[in-house]
Image: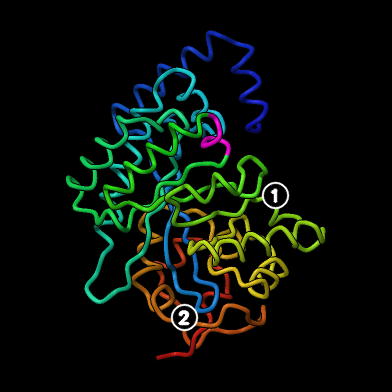
Amino acid sequence: MDERSTAHCLSRRPKQRLRLRMDLSHAIENGELTLHYQPQFVVHSGRVCGVEALARWFRANGDTIEPGVFIPLAEETGLIGALGAWVLQKACETVAGWRTPGAPPITLCVNVSTHQIDERMCAVIQRVVEQAGFPAEQLELEITEGSLMRNPEAALECLRQWKELGVRIAIDDFGAGYSSLGYLSRLPVDRLKLDKSLIRRLTTERKDAVIVRSIIVLGKDLGVSVIAEGVETEQQLQMLQELGCQQVQGYLLARPGPPEGVQALLTSRWGTRHCRVIAERDATLGQQGPAALDRFGDVSPQFRQASAS
């Protein structure tokens, strides 16, 4: 059953929904959820510059509950605070353990729900970074453009408080058409994350390509970086490079994977060495990549090509 069908059934069956809510509460309290991480890459070099933490729920009976089902459920039932705090704590602890002397820092990106945009989140952020020993300046909190517009003034005040703690702020799904440029100029933002729909139509719809180019120029003028997520084809990657996009993320490059696989990517020469981004599909490796990297899964040849050292 796909995600939409599951969500539809849950909305139609109160008993199943109540049971799933209880199971989710139990899963959060007992650490039964897990996190996968999707790498982000610098376009001009191919270096891993960050990872996005993504919650996954694999039940003991073998069922997988999609994030599109359990995250809205957590928001509707008041569990999002506990879920969000767990994700932040677990991600900071995990990524803090990946740091090695001399390696370039990477940004940890954690999604924040609309329901977490309040004064209580400051205490959560401060507690987590202190307990995990994670540098606040390497933590990036992602808020969707739509979430900010539900209560713009309150959101602006919260973001200012978060920035005082030293963390980075990113606007997710940017370009979906919610916010005004005047409001954007007031936000303490470090990065804009292009909406996936724009990337999906990038090579087929001229208007979307113009919008993407405009956002990239806007980001440069405002002094914030721009990342494109949802990159799935080489044509999209090529055009993003031509348009001047600095950073990319998507299935073409690397799928979300378990922490041990991402750590292998970071500690191998594939994750830290500068390499070409736009390369021929049949480019061969100078030598076989480490076996641990294979456990990570689908890492595109674009970011693996490098001469043997």
Of residues 189 and 249, the one drawn nearer to the viewer in this rendering: 189
The residue at the point 70 percent across, 71 percent down is 239
Residue 244 sits above or below residue 250 on the image:
below
Using the image, tell me which numbered label, if any, was put on residue 4. none
> Which of disc 2 and disc 1 is earlier in sequence?
1
Magenta-colored span: 146-150
Q: Taking 189 as reference, is 6 left or right? A: right
The residue that appears at 73% across and 69% down in the rendered structure is 235
Circle 2 is placed at which residue position? 288
Residue beneath the point at 42% across and 57% down = 51
Number of residue marks: 2
Callout 1: SS: helix
Q: Position of residue 221 (x, y in %)?
A: 55, 65
User: Looking at numbered disc 2 in the image, what kind of residue is underneath it?
Assistant: Gln
Quadrant in the rendering for residue 33: top left
Query: Residue 43 in the image: x percent, y percent?
Result: 55, 73
Of 223 and 9, the residue lying toward us: 223
Any part of residue 94 in sight: yes
Q: Which residue is mark 1?
A: 197
Q: Locate residue 214, reporting x and y percent.
A: 67, 62
Quadrant where the image shows the C terminus: bottom left
Q: Is residue 149 magenta?
A: yes
Q: Secondary structure at mark 2?
A: loop
Question: Marks 1 and 2, how far apart in space?
Answer: 36 Å
Q: Residue 298: in sight, yes or no? A: no
Q: Is residue 233 above or below residue 3?
A: below
Q: Amino acid at mark 1?
A: Ser
Q: Position of residue 243 (x, y in %)?
A: 67, 71
Q: Is residue 241 magenta?
A: no
Residue 278 or residue 197, whichever sits in front: 197
